[in-house]
């Protein structure tokens, strides 16, 4: 089995063929998840764009039949793990690239790794703390 | 001010080619607006406001004006029609607007746009879905549905400039302090020529979001458009840059 990592009940997994035409499915899924999880619209959009960008980079290297996205609600916010099978162990996103710059602006934390022919990009986004009854009036 | 009629099309074109005067270009556009209106009406039962369609069609008209060759001996209207219709069709085709968004959702989407703007102002930040739902008096599911449909159908920005044309009439907002620095962007050598192709406003949005870390809401405020519009433009800009790095792209 190529992927047996722990998936908690709080995780939503979307599995698509590794082609650009399915990016919209990933965007919509992560957007729906984040919006229900009390993220602001700005942040929801950031996540959608970040997933788009990370997925595009993964697609360039994908060698398998699918691209997986696990979205997990964490205490601090949301963690999106995108992963796919690749042929080589070269990094899917170079830290000097424009992609990296984009992702840095959109997500609070990014991890990129390729281990045993599996490339993973993890994007984390923190929920902003909404203070209720903070009406200055 | 000289009053022109459609009879003047040919001399006007000759004049435009000779002098490249943008005012003549505009005059020609005005003269042929009825053609755009006529063609736009043929698409009006697809759930988009006619005004928007006319705007889209006008982009096609301008393209036709720029490309029309007097020597070909065809009437301008004959030449322009397929270009205008093409632009309208592209508008519907872009970004999966094959799915027709029900009127109810479109209306909700428009209403939410206003509510989002208001809430953003009141809260000093972008609102959450539950805040929007509460304010609009609808369920969170409805908000999500409307937002998603909004994303689906309005990706082709209505006031997007036509190509790299400086004089496109639908440039709604010239930005005041234009002189923001693009050094950071140009650091990515492969991007520089693509970024050049972007209209000034788009360049600014790109810069503010990715190099200054400004939120969409803040950018919206600064540029004077809605947050949703900023979102759409950003998505579109990134898409353009990606395609451009792969090969050829036209914004």
Image: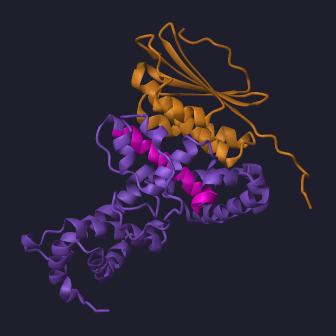
Chain colours: A orange, B purple
Q: Nearer the viewer, residue B200 or A86?
A: B200
**Quadrant housing residue A68:** top right
In the image: residue B45, left or right of residue A112: left
Q: Is residue B87 visible?
A: yes
In the rendered image of this protein, does residue B184 appear above or below residue B16? above
Q: Nearer the viewer, residue B109 or B127?
A: B127
- Quadrant of the snapshot with the N terminus of chain B: bottom left
How far across and how far down the image is residue B196, in percent?
Answer: 37, 48
How far across and how far down the image is residue B33, in percent?
Answer: 33, 79
How far across and how far down the image is residue B133, in percent?
Answer: 75, 56
Is B72 part of what is drawn in magenta? no
* Residue shown at 46% from the left, 24% from the top: A58
Which residues are drawn in magenta? B220-244
In the image: residue B1, left or right of residue A126: left
Q: How many numbered tags mark residues here? A: 0
* Residue shown at 57% from the left, 63% from the top: B106
* Residue shown at 49% from the left, 38% from the top: B184
Q: Name the main secondary structure of what is drawn in magenta.
A: helix
In the image: residue B99, left or right of residue B208: left
In the rendered image of this protein, does residue A124 appear above or below residue B20? above
Q: Is residue B155 visible?
A: no
Q: Nearer the viewer, residue B187 or B84?
A: B187
């Amino acid at each position: 089995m190529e992927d047996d990592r722990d998936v908690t009940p709080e995780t939503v997994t979307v599995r698509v063929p590794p082609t650009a035409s399915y990016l919209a499915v990933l965007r919509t899924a992560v957007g729906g998840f984040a919006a229900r999880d009390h993220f602001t619209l700005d942040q929801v959009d950031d996540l959608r764009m970040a997933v788009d960008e990370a997925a595009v980079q993964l697609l360039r290297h994908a060698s398998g039949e699918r691209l997986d996205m696990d979205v997990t609600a964490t205490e601090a916010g949301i963690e999106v793990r995108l992963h796919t099978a690749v042929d080589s162990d070269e990094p899917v996103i170079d830290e000097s690239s424009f992609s990296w710059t984009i992702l840095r602006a959109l997500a609070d934390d990014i991890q990129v790794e390729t281990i045993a022919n599996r490339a993973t990009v993890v994007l984390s986004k923190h929920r902003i703390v909404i203070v209720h009854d903070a009406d200055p009036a | 001010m000289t009053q022109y009629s459609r009879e003047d099309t040919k001399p006007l074109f000759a004049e435009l080619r000779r002098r490249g005067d943008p005012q003549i270009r505009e005059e020609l556009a005005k003269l042929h607006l009825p053609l755009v209106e006529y063609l736009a009406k043929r698409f009006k039962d697809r759930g988009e406001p006619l005004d928007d369609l006319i705007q889209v069609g006008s982009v096609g008209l301008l393209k036709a004006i720029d490309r029309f060759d007097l020597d070909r001996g065809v009437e301008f209207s004959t030449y322009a029609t397929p270009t205008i219709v093409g632009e309208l069709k592209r508008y519907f085709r872009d970004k999966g607007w094959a799915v027709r968004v029900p009127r109810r959702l479109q209306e909700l989407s428009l209403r939410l746009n206003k509510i989002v703007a208001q809430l953003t102002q009141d809260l000093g930040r972008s609102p959450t879905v539950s805040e929007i739902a509460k304010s609009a008096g609808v369920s969170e599911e409805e908000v999500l549905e409307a937002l998603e449909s909004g994303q689906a159908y309005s990706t082709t920005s209505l006031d997007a400039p036509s190509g790299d044309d400086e004089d496109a009439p639908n440039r709604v907002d010239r930005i005041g302090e234009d002189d923001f620095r693009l050094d950071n962007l140009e650091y990515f050598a492969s991007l520089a020529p693509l970024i050049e192709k972007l209209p000034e406003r788009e360049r600014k949005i790109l810069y503010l979001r990715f190099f200054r870390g400004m939120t969409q809401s803040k950018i919206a405020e600064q540029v004077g458009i809605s947050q949703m519009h900023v979102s759409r433009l950003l998505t579109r800009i990134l898409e353009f840059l990606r395609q451009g790095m792969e090969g050829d792209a036209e914004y």
